Structures are given as structure tokens and as C-alpha cells.
Image: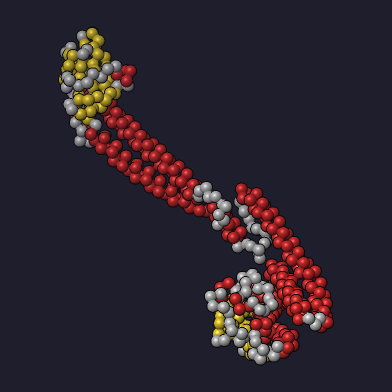
Amino acid sequence: MSRAAQISGSIRRRLIGQLVLGSAVLAAVLVLLVTNLARNVAQDTQDSILMASVTSILDTMTVRDGEISVDLPYAALSMLGNVSEDRVFYRILADGQLLTGYEDLPDPGDPGRDGGYITAPYAGTEVRMATAERRLSVAGTPIMVTVSVAQTRQGLMQTLAQVSRRGAAVGIGFFVLAALLAVLTTEFGLRPLRDLAGAVSRRGPKDLRSVKGPVPQEMAPLVISLNSFIDRLRYSLSRSEDFIAEAAHRVRTPLFTVRTQAEIALRRVERPENRAAIKEMIRALDESSRAAGQLLDHAMVTFRTDHLEKERVLLTELAEELVDRLRPVADLRDIGLSMQSEGTPEVLGDAVLIENALRNVLDNAIKYSAPDSDVDIRIGREASDCFIMVRDHAGGFPEGALHRMTERFARGDNAGGTVGSGLGLTIAREVLEAHGGRLTLENKGDGACVTLWFPAS
């Protein structure tokens, strides 16, 4: 991740946090609703039974011989006892005078105003009391009869506590389920963003394709902007490659002309100091010409790796043709080129790029080898890979420098007296990476061994 990028938090954590918080609020609301509903239902049930008991008592009251007769029905109080283990109290008044029951029950107030129900402390606990009135005519005189029935609330409180516990369990279960759904919803919702990030992360200088595929409507502006940026980057890289190729081409031609004139001048100059100066100039021209040539090769490789033209390539035939072309150069330095092929290895790739990579490796082997030495080329197949192994007897790579020899313009400490640009192994590595292969460097005996690995077709 770039150091310039400033992380302001995680969208995933933010979404999950918000959804889980919403789930917690909904769970709490659910628990409160269930508890309140249960409390109201239980209270209404108790009130209905209390009022039914009061009504039953009122219905049995009669006037006999000028007196009010009260015959408490068994069912009036037994129905309250069946509901719970609570205690039951009653009181019957006639024009405010106690007829029977508990005189010290709480004052019912105005039954018409409060609906006939009150909750008040009594006998060291809390009771719920229902009260109703009825007028009776005694000897032609109207008398107001008031009946009150009270019941303790321990059973109701136990029931409400049990309902609250179950409601809390339901709320917790709802919260857990909602939190799990929140996590799953967040993961599913962020999947298009992760897919887009994965598609972008796989792109680079060698893969500048536009991002395609279905995306959510909210991400469409981001994808459009990203594809526009990729197009601009591809155009910029293309212009840079064209510039390098054109520059290398235009520099190499006049350098060749200058080198030819320098060689002619060298034959005519006799003074040692002048000859040394001209030789140094020729050497500098050779280095510049080689660097321009390899820059041109590198630009060509960079362009073609973006647009691989794959075909079946027989490695043995390709290597034989290249060795035949390089053999005159090797013969000038009395360097032998020997090739050994095991079978007919075949790969699927760009023949031009593969030849370019092998030519750079062979050119390095010939360039650094001492006269009267050999360069061995071995071609074969190992497991699911095909390989071309090039081994020389030039002393090998510097110790501890193998990891950087394929970097651009990297040269070993023992290459000071040899013309080179440090791009040969870089070109070979990039070609192999474009084909899904790899380049391995190692020292064997008195020389270096470079192996080009390709996936077999």
C-alpha cells in the first residue's frame, strides 16, 4: 500500500457496527414491547377476574325482611385462588357501613372515575383491588352497596418476571440472528468492491486491460473513472516505449557511422597517445551502440508482452537456428558452441520474444567467456516444464549478487572490462514472466549457468 494513502477506517467495520447497533436497538425495543404487552395482558386478566368476582357477589345480594342478605358464592373467590397462590381479601359496605369482610382495605376512591380498579399497599404487600356499586331498595329506601375484592400481586409479578426472562431470551436471540445477518449482508454487499479491488490489483504495466463485468450502479462512476485512468496510462506507456525505440534507432545509426570513421582514423594514427584515445572512443561507441540496441530490444519486449502472439514453438529448432547465427561471432573468439537436446520440447508462446531472451543469454555467455572455452546449451523437459540451460566457463556470477543480476542495468563486479548495458538478463526475465515461466541463475564449477523455464504446452 502506498504511503501516501491515508486510511480513514474500515467500511466493513463501519457497516457492521451500524447494523449491529441497529439490531441491538431493535432487540431492546422488542423486549420492551413484549414485556409491556405481557404486563398489560396479565393486568387485564387479573382485573377481569377480580371484576367477575365482584359482579358475582353483587348478583347474589338480596333484600329479605327489610335487611340486606349476603350469600358469598364459593365460585366468586375460588376463581381467584385457582389463578395463583395469592391471598384474596373482600369487603362489603352498605352506605359506607361494613357488612362483612376486611374493614381496613384501602379506600377505593370513586369507582366510576378510576374504572373500579386501584393498586395500593395492604398487609405488608401490594394488592390489586376491584370495586363496584349497586343500589338496593330496603323498605323503600335506596341504599348504595359497595363490594371490593382485592388480591395480592406476587403471582402476577412472578409471571411477569418469567415473561421478561423469556422476552429477554427472545431479544438476545433476535440480536444474535440480526448481528449474523448484518455480517453476512455486509460481506455480500462488499463483495463487488473486493472483486473490483482484485481485478485492479492484478493489473500493472503488463496488464492494462479495462475493467469489465457487471458492477452495482453505485460503483459505475468509479469503474468508469478507473478505466479512463488505465486508458491514459496505457497511452502514456505506449508513447514512452515508442520514444525509447525511436531514440535507440536514431542514436544507433550515427554511432555506427562514427565508429567506422574512428576505425579508419585509428589505422592512420601512429602516435601511441592518439591511438589510445581513439581506442577509448571506439570502446565508448561500442557501449553506446550496444546500450541503444538493447534499449530497442527492451522496448520491443515490453510492447509484445502486453500483446502476446502465442503459437507452438519447438525449442530445439529455435535454439539451433539462433546458434547457427551466433556461431561466426563465437568463432572469432575461438569459443565453441555445443548443443544437446533431449526429445522435442514444445511450448506455447511468442517465438520472437523467446528467441530474443535466448539470444541475450547466449550473447552474455559468449561475451564473458575466455577464448578457447566452450558454451554448452542443453534443452529438455522436467516434469511439467521445458527448459533451455546455458552454461559457460567464464568464472560465474559474483558471490552474493545473484539476486540483483536480473535488475535493470545491474552488472557484476567482474564485468568492468566488458562492453555491456546490464539489460540482457532483465529482458530474458521479463519474457519468461510474460510466458508464466521463470529465470534461474546459479554458479556451477568454473562458470555461470542460466536456465530458462517455460510451462510445457
- From the viewer's perspective, is 295 left or right of 12? right
Give the residue at x 78% y 67%.
Answer: 246
Give the residue at x 73% y 62%.
Answer: 240
| Res. 436 in view | no
- From the viewer's perspective, is 363 left or right of 271? left
Residue 66 picture quarter: top left
- From the viewer's perspective, is 67 left or right of 242? left
The mark total stands at 0
Q: Nearer the viewer, residue 440 or 336?
A: 336
Query: In the picture, which quadrant includes the C terminus?
Result: bottom right
Q: Which of 421 and 156 is in front in this view?
A: 421
Give the residue at x 32% y 30%.
Answer: 44
Extreme residue in the top direction: 140
Residue 163 picture quarter: top left
Say how the picture is coloured: secondary structure
Provide residue 414's location: percent of width, then percent of height: 61, 78
Vertical arrangement, residue 455 with respect to residue 144, above or below: below
Provide residue 91's location: percent of width, then percent of height: 19, 21
Vertical arrangement, residue 138 with respect to residue 128, above or below: above
Q: Which of 414 and 180 is in front in this view?
A: 414
Residue 169 picture quarter: top left
Provide residue 237's location: percent of width, then percent of height: 71, 61
Give the residue at x 20% y 19%.
Answer: 92
| Res. 370 in view | yes
Q: Which of 192 and 308 is in front in this view?
A: 308
Provide residue 392's location: percent of width, then percent of height: 62, 85
Query: In the picture, which quadrant includes the N terminus?
Result: bottom right
